[in-house]
Image (cartoon, grey):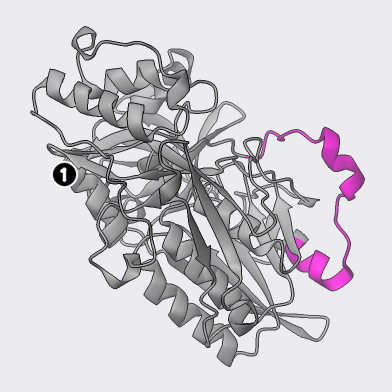
């Protein structure tokens, strides 16, 4: 989850300001940038006592400094550096430069999880469940074996063509060379209603916690309220997080006025910055579903603000997780602009109204289910959604909850891992 540095927009008024201790970049040389990263780690980093004695002059870039300094294994990916333009496009416009797909390695194959509407990938015929065979003429199996699959799609550059061969979910072979361009991610991508044992159940597929999400969530909840939804299945299976304030807003839409002014979350900084600790409270949106229970679909790619939402609601209403255990990121960052980049160091942990946090192993699943890429998202036949609807109908899990302790990911389940803002999506 991210705390934005500026507080000029209405969305950000309740978020933490940047601590006064934050340092500015003295220069934009490699040494100046690495020094900026060192100085802010020493002051803001949640685990600053564990930092190594590393000279900025001994590294070639700020990225190398961060990689060598970060506290492993807790912070292998949480703190990050990205370009300022890409960071602003994602958080302000829900955009990135790419082909418009998210992917995962499943049973040794590269499979498509999502295809964003209107993207180059969608125009090329790729769909959810497609198996990518070659990338720029190289077999995916060879790229995996050589450890090159993570960089196989190339840099995020406008007009860069990527030659692909693939097999769609229905078994049709395809070939295309889509060119990368700005892709807009619809944050609320799907809203549906199901009738389950005489109750109206809303379904909402939510992709990321960014500024455009607020208006999209308001519209979706208004539609669900008009439809008379009495229950909600919130699909966060690929939602790697985003802004804290958006999570707080969504919590208010779910709980309604009953949660107004209740504690949503508390931020806890290191002992140098305890004065920046803050309590965030539910707003209790008037237009809400006022739910007494929430069912969440999650995977190991559900992280950060997704987990903050689940943990923040848990003291006030039952939250049932269907699918798999979440990723495990009970910490947040500040976005610190420098030169043409943004540095986002882990600066605080978060707990709920009961003081519960520290879920580095993820939040546990209640009803195990596969991410069924053989079905479209939102289909009642898709395994995770079918399990969620069955739980609402019967109050029981299938398979039984007693098996969850020894459960392992099956060959049909993706095991994506978020990294920085871009891998909040695992997008290409």
- Which sits in the foreground, 96 or 386? 96
Q: What percent of the width, then of the height, locates residue 298? A: 63, 52
Q: Quadrant of the C terminus?
A: top left
Residue sitting at x 12%, y 37% = 339
Q: What percent of the width, then of the height, locates residue 382? A: 67, 58
Q: What percent of the width, then of the height, locates residue 48? A: 42, 26
Residue sitting at x 83%, y 41% = 404
Task: Say whether residue 408 is magenta.
Answer: yes
* Secondary structure category for the residue under label 1: loop
Asked if residue 4 lies left or right of residue 181, the reply is right
Quarter of the rendering containing residue 36: top left
Residue bearing the label numbered 1: 158
Asked if residue 394 lies left or right of residue 30, the reply is right
Residue sitting at x 30%, y 45% = 335
- Which sits in the foreground, 153 or 292? 292
The residue sitting at the top extreme is 58
Residue sitting at x 47%, y 51% = 277
Quarter of the rendering containing residue 138: top left
Task: Say whether residue 355 is magenta.
Answer: no
Query: Is there any visible trace of residue 378 in the rendered image?
Result: no
Stretch of the chain drawn in magenta: 388-413
Asked if 83 appears above or below 286 in the picture, the reply is: above
């Amino acid at each position: 989850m991210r705390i934005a540095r500026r507080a000029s927009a209405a969305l950000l008024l309740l978020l933490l300001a940047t601590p006064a201790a934050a340092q500015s970049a003295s220069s934009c040389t490699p040494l100046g940038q690495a020094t900026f990263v060192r100085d802010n780690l020493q002051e803001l980093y949640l685990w600053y006592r564990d930092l190594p004695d590393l000279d900025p002059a001994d590294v070639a870039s700020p990225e190398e400094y961060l990689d060598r300094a970060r506290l492993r294994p807790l912070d292998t990916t949480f703190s990050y550096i990205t370009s300022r333009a890409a960071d602003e496009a994602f958080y302000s416009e829900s955009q990135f430069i790419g082909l418009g797909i998210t992917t995962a390695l499943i049973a040794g194959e590269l499979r498509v999880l999502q295809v964003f509407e209107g993207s180059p990938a969608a125009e090329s015929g790729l769909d959810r469940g497609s198996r990518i065979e070659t990338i720029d003429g190289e077999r995916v199996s060879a790229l995996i074996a050589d450890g090159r699959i993570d960089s196989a799609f190339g840099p995020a550059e406008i007009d860069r063509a990527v030659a692909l061969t693939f097999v769609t979910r229905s078994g049709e072979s395809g070939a295309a060379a889509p060119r990368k361009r700005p892709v807009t991610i619809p944050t609320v991508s799907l809203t549906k209603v199901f009738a389950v044992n005489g109750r109206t159940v809303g379904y909402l597929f939510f992709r990321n916690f960014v500024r455009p999400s607020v208006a999209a969530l308001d519209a979706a909840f208004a539609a669900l309220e008009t439809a008379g939804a009495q229950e909600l299945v919130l699909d966060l299976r690929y939602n790697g997080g985003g802004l804290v304030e958006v999570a707080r807003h969504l919590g208010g839409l779910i709980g309604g006025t009953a949660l107004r002014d209740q504690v949503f979350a508390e931020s806890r900084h290191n002992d140098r910055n305890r004065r920046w600790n803050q309590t965030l409270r539910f707003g209790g949106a008037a237009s809400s579903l006022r739910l007494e229970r929430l069912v969440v679909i999650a995977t190991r790619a559900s992280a950060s603000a997704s987990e903050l939402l689940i943990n923040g609601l848990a003291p006030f209403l039952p939250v049932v997780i269907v699918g798999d255990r979440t990723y495990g990121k009970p910490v947040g960052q500040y976005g610190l602009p420098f030169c043409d980049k943004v540095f986002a160091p882990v600066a605080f942990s978060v707990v709920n109204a009961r003081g519960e946090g520290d879920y580095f192993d993820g939040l546990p699943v209640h009803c195990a289910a596969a991410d069924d890429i053989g079905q479209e998202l939102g289909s009642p036949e898709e395994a995770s959604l079918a399990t969620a609807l069955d739980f609402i109908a019967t109050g029981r899990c299938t398979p039984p909850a007693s098996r969850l302790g020894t459960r392992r990911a099956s060959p049909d389940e993706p095991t994506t891992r978020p990294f920085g803002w871009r891998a909040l999506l695992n997008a290409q």
